[in-house]
Image (spheres, helix red, strand yellow):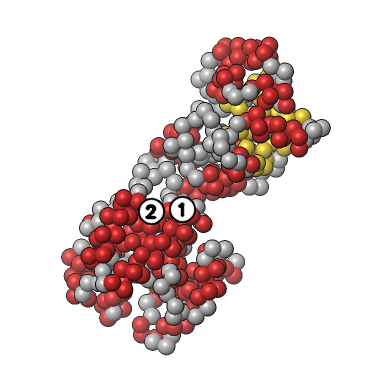
């Protein structure tokens, strides 16, 4: 077999990466190309790198259904820095009779002789370098020539000029330039938005502590204790489902921030700020604590992140097609450790960590059953959400 290994942080993966892998596969008649997702690379600033499992998910989505492209995730599980010579030593042991081809960008090739133990890497593989539009081709040819003289393995240029998109410009522009969407598979773009990656609005534990102080003052003791339970459960669920965990904690801290005010106050906040009130909300104004809570999160507690505000807004009823954070807060509110009255809580708590959509559905099913005994209290949004998730799961 002829096996390509394409190493990179893929932060995020975009169309050019896939085109390079396919070009190398065609030109060098490779049977398969593995995207090797680097863990902690020795030579790169990782401050802007999102969670390893998010990068893994994005590569998985990008290559899904493309023949001959696969994933290699060994480096993200390895302790310490990701040295390529260790990976290629392992790969050689696993494939003693196969020929290995290490695919890299032209910038990596130019630097190759400064890597840690390049002589071991080149002993086990041939190197294929992908030039980018605007590259100094003489400099690359010269590097290839030099490397061939110094090292054992062979060095080749991939006959494909990759267009000059950089992951860094995607990271910076993804929220402001809608055209970025065309530079990556749709599923990857949707994943970035859903998981709130590369956003400017990230929070720290200092923010959580600030909100903790505020909620201590704002809420009754039992509501405050519930809030802490929701924030911590949201944190765990976020870790499980690869969502920025502190952001989820912030949403959890604030989800009931408008719970301990009077009905009159909730109605007046809505009326003054043009927040629409439905008939059922007029009848049972406590239902407004989600909408008012979202308003307070932004105006009173200075939260800029729209995903957080939305999750607070819909946390009681849910809504069709909830975002990942909406689901995390909706579920955390129901399963936090202080809850003990709902039926089949142990099952629901367990499902929260294995199938989030199913968990949302089970909670809605129990809520609808409960509300059926008080039919005029049922918010139609709860029914719409229940029907949406029933259909989704039937699919
Ligand atoms: Fe609530
Ligand atoms: Fe709550």
Q: CA distance from mark 1 to mark 2?
A: 8 Å
Residue 188 shown left or right of residue 173 in the figure:
right
Image quadrant assignment for residue 340: bottom left
Q: Residue at x 72, y 23 (%)?
A: 123
Quadrant of the drawing holding the C terminus: bottom right
Residue 221 is marked as none
Query: Ligand 2 within 8 A of label 1's CB?
Result: no
> x and y percent of residue 118 in the render?
64, 22
| Residue hosting label 2 | 247
| Residue hosting label 1 | 243
Where 310 sits versus 26, above or below? below
Between residue 308 and residue 95, name the one nearer to us.
95
Image quadrant assignment for residue 278: bottom left
**Residue 161 shows in the view:** no
Q: Residue at x 56, y 37 (%)?
A: 80
**Residue 265 shows in the view:** yes
> x and y percent of residue 335 in the render?
45, 70
Where 51 sits versus 265, above or below? above
Query: Ligand 2 within 8 A of label 2's CB?
Result: no
Quadrant of the drawing holding the N terminus: top right
> x and y percent of residue 150 in the render?
67, 13
Q: Residue at x 39, y 87 (%)?
A: 374
Q: Are marks 1 and 2 in contact (CB under 8 Å)?
A: yes
Q: Secondary structure at mark 1?
A: loop
Q: Secondary structure at mark 2?
A: helix
Mark 1 neighbour class, 10 Å CA radius: few under 14, some 14 to 19, many 20 or more: many
Where 114 sits versus 22, above or below? above
Between residue 279 and residue 202, name the one nearer to us.
202
């Amino acid at each position: 077999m002829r096996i390509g290994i394409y190493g990179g942080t893929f932060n995020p993966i975009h169309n050019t990466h896939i085109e390079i892998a396919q070009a190398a596969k065609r030109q060098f008649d490779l049977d398969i190309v593995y995207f090797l997702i680097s863990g902690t690379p020795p030579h790169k600033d990782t401050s802007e790198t999102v969670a390893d499992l998010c990068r893994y998910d994005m590569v998985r989505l990008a290559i899904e259904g493309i023949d001959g492209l696969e994933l290699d995730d060994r480096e993200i599980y390895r302790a310490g820095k990701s040295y390529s010579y260790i990976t290629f030593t392992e790969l050689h042991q696993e494939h003693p009779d196969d020929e290995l081809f290490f695919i890299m960008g032209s910038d990596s090739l130019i630097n190759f002789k400064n890597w840690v133990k390049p002589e071991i890497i080149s002993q086990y593989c041939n190197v294929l370098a992908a030039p980018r539009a605007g590259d100094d081709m003489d400099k690359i040819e010269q590097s290839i020539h030099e490397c061939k003289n110094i090292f054992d393995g062979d060095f080749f240029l991939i006959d494909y000029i990759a267009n000059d998109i950089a992951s860094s410009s995607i990271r910076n522009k993804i929220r402001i330039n809608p055209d970025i969407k065309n530079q990556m598979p749709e599923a990857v773009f949707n994943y970035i938005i859903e998981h709130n990656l590369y956003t400017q609005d990230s929070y720290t534990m200092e923010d959580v502590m600030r909100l903790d102080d505020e909620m201590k003052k704002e809420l009754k003791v039992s509501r405050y204790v519930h809030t802490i339970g929701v924030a911590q459960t949201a944190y765990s669920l976020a870790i499980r489902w690869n969502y920025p965990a502190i952001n989820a904690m912030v949403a959890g801290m604030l989800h009931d921030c408008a719970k301990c005010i009077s009905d009159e106050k909730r109605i007046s906040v809505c009326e003054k700020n043009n927040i629409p009130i439905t008939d059922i909300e007029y009848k049972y104004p406590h239902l407004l604590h989600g909408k008012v809570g979202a308003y307070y999160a932004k105006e009173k507690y200075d939260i800029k992140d729209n995903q957080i505000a939305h999750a607070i807004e819909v946390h009681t009823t849910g809504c069709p097609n909830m975002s990942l954070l909406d689901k995390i807060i909706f579920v955390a509110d129901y399963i936090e450790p202080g809850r003990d009255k709902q039926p089949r809580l142990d099952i629901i708590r367990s499902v929260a960590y294995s199938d989030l959509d199913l968990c949302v559905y089970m909670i809605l099913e129990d809520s609808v059953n409960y509300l059926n005994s008080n039919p005029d209290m049922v918010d139609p949004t709860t029914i719409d959400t229940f029907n949406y998730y029933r259909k989704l799961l039937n699919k």
